[in-house]
Amino acid sequence: MSDKKPFTNPEIAIHHELAQWAADCAERTLHLFEELHPDDERPRFAIDTLRAWIRDEKTMAECRQAAFRAHDAAREVGEPQAIAAARACGQAASVAHMFTHSPNVADYAIKAIGLSVLKNKAETAKTAERDWQWNHLRDDLRHIGFPKGKNGSAKIRI
């Protein structure tokens, strides 16, 4: 028997809080995409749409469409850090549909950060980013944002 807490649908306030955290995590890497592709607004639009959903100004369906477009952007670029940053944004917008996407946002953000620095600095940069993510999520929600614990991560691809 597992000692992990099962995922259940949270109250809307909790769902919004997870979405806000996901948007913040993704936005921290957005510049890695925008510096290389300044004319492509799809990843930023995904985050903006999610934030509008949190304010009840956009629908979950609009967030899903924005997520799909951010993932399209990821498929259309070649730089690994830009791909991972766009995927973080797409996963963030997906949190409106399923709050369980939030760990993927954190993991893609970590991947983007690690790919954006020299290899000998990657672990330090990734650790610093994970610490930021951890410290910016309420203690009682960490089992959702980090289902494998602070230092665990999902197997994500770019």
Image (tube, helix red, strand yellow):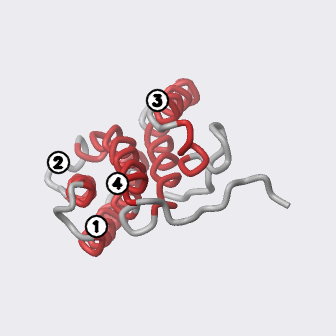
Residue 89: in sight, yes or no? yes
Q: Is residue 122 above or below residue 24?
A: above
Helix, strand or loop at disc 3? helix
Q: CA distance from mark 3 to mark 1?
A: 25 Å
What amino acid type is highlighted by mark number 3? Answer: Trp
User: Observer-nearest residue: 119 or 12?
Assistant: 12
Upstream in the sequence, badge 3 or badge 4?
Answer: 4
Q: Is residue 25 above or below residue 40?
A: above
What amino acid type is highlighted by mark number 2? Answer: Pro
Which residue does the image show at 46% across and 29% down from the upper left? 132
Residue under numbered circle 1: 63
Which of the numbered marks, if any, corresponds to residue 38?
A: 2
Residue under numbered circle 3: 132
Upstream in the sequence, badge 3 or badge 2?
Answer: 2
What amino acid type is highlighted by mark number 4? Answer: Cys
Alpha-carbon neighbours of circle 4 within 10 Å: few (<14), some, or many (≥20)? many
